[in-house]
């Protein structure tokens, strides 16, 4: 089963940072004078920072100059980092460490495949940075999910063909990217929202060892 590798998305899979993105974007919306709800925030999941601002401005029907947009992006990230700097290992989502331990015990390599430019910092904050075989983040890609670029670079880092890679994702755009890359997509979240995934679990506590063995080595079971 060592011919398989795993690619983990970060936000919404390993940690719930969506709540911090929400607070930081809400502050921008408040300053611009329109309402930004949690339902709106769903639209920003898996989406790059620049694209998120475009979506936010569309919601508020606000037009800004490129210079003003740059200022908003800097200010949003400054606020977001304020929350990230307070994060610790206690924010790792339930079941994640059990799955990572299983992969380590079975010598299965895993890399990160995230749209976030803050991914390395977050992994350091939660003390997981050293465990990843490689990191592909928002600084490494030129095309955002659903483009498969982030996962294809991940496969390269794993020295594996895409079809041997298994992706854990919470965003529709991420599941789509994994499928375009010809990888197995495991959705973490709502079954209906992530219906394009090969398997969907509410969270990692629902993933059994038997499932992982089956996934990693279909001949074993
Ligand atoms: C993704 C999040 O992982 O990263 C998005 O799901 C976020 O909500 C994107 O916009 C970019 O993150 P950052 O940290 O570079 O602003
Ligand atoms: Mg995500």
Image: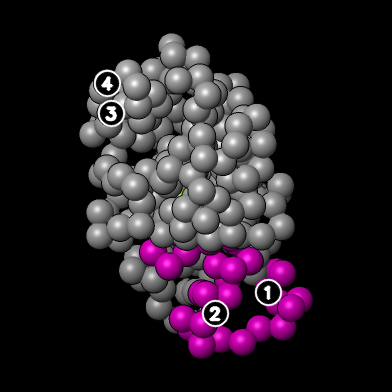
Is 94 displayed left or right of 124 in the figure?
A: left
In the rendered image, which residue does mark 1 sit on? Answer: 69
In the rendered image, which residue does mark 2 sit on? Answer: 57
In the rendered image, which residue does mark 3 sit on? Answer: 211
Q: Where does the image place residue 71, in percent across and percent down from the top left?
A: 70, 69
Q: Nearer the viewer, mark 3 or mark 4?
A: 4
Q: Where are the magenta residues, as a range? A: 42-71
Mark identifier at residue 221: 4
Tell me the element at label 3: helix
Quarter occupied by residue 160: top right
The disc, 3 or 4, on the residue closer to the chain's N-terminal end is 3
Q: Nearer the viewer, mark 2 or mark 4?
A: 4
Task: Say which quadrant the N terminus sits in.
Answer: top left
| Residue at left offset 52%, top offset 29% | 5
The disc, 2 or 4, on the residue closer to the chain's N-terminal end is 2
Binning the other alpha carbons within 10 Å of mark 4 as few (below 14), some (14 to 19) or many (20 upward) gives few
The disc, 2 or 1, on the residue closer to the chain's N-terminal end is 2
| Residue at left offset 23%, top offset 34% | 206
Q: Where does the image place residue 67, in percent across and percent down from the top left?
A: 76, 76
């Amino acid at each position: 089963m060592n011919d398989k590798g795993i690619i983990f998305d970060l936000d919404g899979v390993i940690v719930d940072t969506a709540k911090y993105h929400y607070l930081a974007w809400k502050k921008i919306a408040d300053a611009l004078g329109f309402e930004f709800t949690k339902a709106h925030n769903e639209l920003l999941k898996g989406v790059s920072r620049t694209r998120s601002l475009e979506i936010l401005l569309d919601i508020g029907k606000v037009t800004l100059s490129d210079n003003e947009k740059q200022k908003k992006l800097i200010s949003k990230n400054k606020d977001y980092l304020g929350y990230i700097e307070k994060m610790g290992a206690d924010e790792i989502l339930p079941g994640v460490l059990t799955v990572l331990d299983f992969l380590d015990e079975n010598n299965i390599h895993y890399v990160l495949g995230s749209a976030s430019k803050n991914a390395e910092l977050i992994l350091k904050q939660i003390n997981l940075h050293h465990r990843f075989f490689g990191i592909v983040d928002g600084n490494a890609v030129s095309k955002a999910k659903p483009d498969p670029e982030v996962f294809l670079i991940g496969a390269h880092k794993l020295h594996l063909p895409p079809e041997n890679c298994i992706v854990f994702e919470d965003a529709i755009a991420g599941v789509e990217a994994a499928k375009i890359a010809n990888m197995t997509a495991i959705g973490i979240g709502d079954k209906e929202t992530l219906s394009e995934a090969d398997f969907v679990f509410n969270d990692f506590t629902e993933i059994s060892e038997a499932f992982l063995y089956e996934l990693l080595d279909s001949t074993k079971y």
